[in-house]
Amino acid sequence: MARQVLIIHGWSDTSRSFHALATFLTGHGYAPKLLWLGDYISRDDDVRVEDVGMRMGEVIADMLKSGELDKSFDVIVHSTGGLVVREWLTSSYKGSAEQCPMKRLVMLAPANYGSKLAATGKSFLGRIVKGYDNWFQSGKAMLNDLELSSPFQWALAQRDVLQMPGADTNNYYGRKLVWPFVIVGTHPYASALRQIVNEDGSDGTVRACAANLNARGVTFDFRETDMQKLVTVWGSRLEADAPLAVLATRTHGSIIDPDRVDKDNQEKIQETPDEKQQLG
């Protein structure tokens, strides 16, 4: 039986964007399933990442109960979908990650530590561009969570990545728990309008360093005169560093199309045969 793979989209997107990825997975012997969270409403101003994570848990529980979903499956997320699945994992399986039916988690351009564009999305321009068909709502609550170094991301990282002194010892990622992988591009957007948001080290939306799940925590206590006590290094909840692949020819949009052929390369980004195979 083909292994099932759930696909979860990001902010302002829908499952329609992932037909090419689903076709690719089917061709490689997997059974892709789009997680219908009502194509979760990420552009309503009062919807938070926590809300979507909670609903994700309800939908998965229903699918497991009905037999539509196998008791063991994998997940592919894009962009904000990374925060959603991490929220679900840490809220639903606190202290019992080994019981989570998700076994492998592939993150495509995840905003694990935020995106510079979140602030732009909340601006007047963002509300016009992204909210013109949604009563000019662009998802203020979710964009607050997506801002660089947001309180939500800080709290989430302390639950599943960082272990500050005195914190619980719950772990979520490992070969016998949930095995995470991160893939991100570093090619800027090529279209004229989108070029205004490009920056070095970014795929046009997410910086490679902000996609990388691996992080370390350190406390500096400047009240201390004893140099041995000045710095406290936090523990890590990661069994090992999460694998990270950085692809120089992929943008935030094209990272979700592993089998992209030349005629679908609308951005006209040059790729060698070897570069085309990196994502596949």
Image (tube, rainbow, N blue to C red):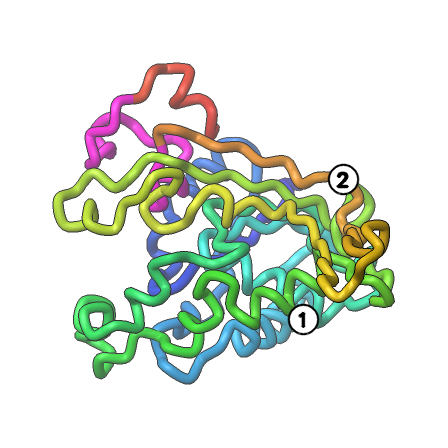
What is the number of callouts on the image? 2
The x and y percentages for residue 49 are 52, 72
- Which quadrant of the figure has residue 256? top left
Disc number at residue 240?
A: 2
Q: Is residue 9 visible?
A: no
Q: Callout 1 environment at 10 Å: few (<14), some (14 to 19), or many (20+)?
A: few
Does 268 lie within the magenta span?
Answer: yes
Classified by dominant secondary structure, the portion drawn in magenta counts as: loop
Residue in the picture at 43% in, 46% down: 207
Q: Amino acid at mark 1?
A: Ala
Magenta range: 250-270
Q: Is residue 158 left or right of residue 7?
A: right
Residue furthest front as drawn: 225
Q: Give the SS element for disc 1.
A: helix
Q: Is residue 117 above or below residue 43?
A: above
In the image, residue 75 lies in the stretch drawn in magenta = no
Which image quarter: residue 54?
A: bottom right
Mark 2, other Cα within 10 Å: few <14 / some 14–19 / many ≥20: few
Say whether residue 222 is visible: yes
**Label 1: which residue?**
61
270, above or below 13, in the image: above
Query: In the current view of this chain or complex, which residue is farthest to the left?
Result: 192
Left or right, 104 with reference to 200: right
